């Protein structure tokens, strides 16, 4: 790509797959096969969220997943760890409100990497924009057991954040085939897609679930 240009395309947020090592262990899958399956089913971006992995294993997993993602032209983001993203030349990072501030991550990663920030409020969305982030993740929209102690914002909170945000938004938290339609149907311009963990990775067939979600998203956003 052209020097200085961001490689980020907001449409990549459409079906955002976030990995979970515990779920892969439960189903006896390696991270690479799980990521491969999510992409085969239609995931448009992948985030490696390895909360338990030691740094060396995290880097190894990221390198292996990057190979799959690159060959499918799907961006790979790293959760929390700017150092891991740099070490692997991943496409970017996703940071929460307690992680490295987005403005610091931007200064370290430079203009071309993708930076996402978790936001629950309009003020946080404004800050993410001011810090030079590319997108925000808003949630938890619905209750979930995937992330502990996570307050939910509901569809109303999601709408407030989307309306306030100058950046594209992906909804996260408790989203599955059962409610993805209701999320997209709030029909606010900044909302670009849904991010899911358990709806893909805590299922027997990741490919099938990704396809199912994709078709629900396509149906609900076509008449948005
Ligand atoms: N951030 C807010 S909710 C959440 C994260 C990482 C977990 C989402 O997991 P699931 O299984 O899609 O509800
Ligand atoms: Mg984090």
Image (cartoon, rainbow, N blue to C red):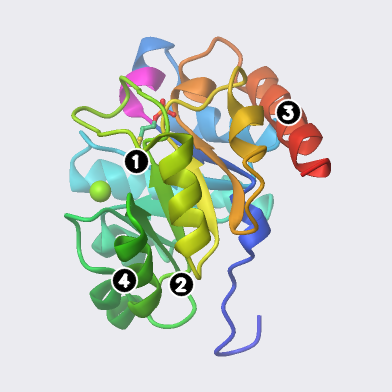
The answer to whether the beta carbon of the residue marked 1 is less than 8 Å from any atom of ligand 1 is: yes
Q: Are marks 2 and 3 in contact (CB under 8 Å)?
A: no
Q: Callout 3: helix, strand or loop?
A: helix
Q: Residue at x 50, y 27 (%)?
A: 175
CA gap, disc 2 to disc 3? 30 Å
Residue furthest to the bottom in view is: 3
Mark nearer the viewer, 1 or 4: 4
Q: Quadrant of residue 221?
A: top right
Q: Earlier in the sequence, mark 2 or mark 3?
A: 2
Q: Position of residue 197 (x, y in %)?
A: 45, 29
From the viewer's perspective, tell me whether residue 80 is left or right of residue 196: left
**What residue is pinned by disc 4?**
127
> Is residue 74 something that shows in the picture?
no
Mark nearer the viewer, 4 or 2: 4
Q: Earlier in the sequence, mark 1 or mark 2?
A: 1
**What residue is pinned by disc 2?**
113
Q: Callout 1: helix, strand or loop?
A: loop
Which region of the structure is painted magenta? 20-24
The answer to whether the beta carbon of the residue marked 4 is less than 8 Å from any atom of ligand 2 is: no
Please state which of residues 71 and 147 is positioned toward the viewer in this rendering: 147
**What residue is pinned by disc 3?**
216
Q: Residue at x 67, y 37 (%)?
A: 185
Q: Are marks 1 and 4 in contact (CB under 8 Å)?
A: no
**What residue is pinned by disc 1?**
49
């Amino acid at each position: 790509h052209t020097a200085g240009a961001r490689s980020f395309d907001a449409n990549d947020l459409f079906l955002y797959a976030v990995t979970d090592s515990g779920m892969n262990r439960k189903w006896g899958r390696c991270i690479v096969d799980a990521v491969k399956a999510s992409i085969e089913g239609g995931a448009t971006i992948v985030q490696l969220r390895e909360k338990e992995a030691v740094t060396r294993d995290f880097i190894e997993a990221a390198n292996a997943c990057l190979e799959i993602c690159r060959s499918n032209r799907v961006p790979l983001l790293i959760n929390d760890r700017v150092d891991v993203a740099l070490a692997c030349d991943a496409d970017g990072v996703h940071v929460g409100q307690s992680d490295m501030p987005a403005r610091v991550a931007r200064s370290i990663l430079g203009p071309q990497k993708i930076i996402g920030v978790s936001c629950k409020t309009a003020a946080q969305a404004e800050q993410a924009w001011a810090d030079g982030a590319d997108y925000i993740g808003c949630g938890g929209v619905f209750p979930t057991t995937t992330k502990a102690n996570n307050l939910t914002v509901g569809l109303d909170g999601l709408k407030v954040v989307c309306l306030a945000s100058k950046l594209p938004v992906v909804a996260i938290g408790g989203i599955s085939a059962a409610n993805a339609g209701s999320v997209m149907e709030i029909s606010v311009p900044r909302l670009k897609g849904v991010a899911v963990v358990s709806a893909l990775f805590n299922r027997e067939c990741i490919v099938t679930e990704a396809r199912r979600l994709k078709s629900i998203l396509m149906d609900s956003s076509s008449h948005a």
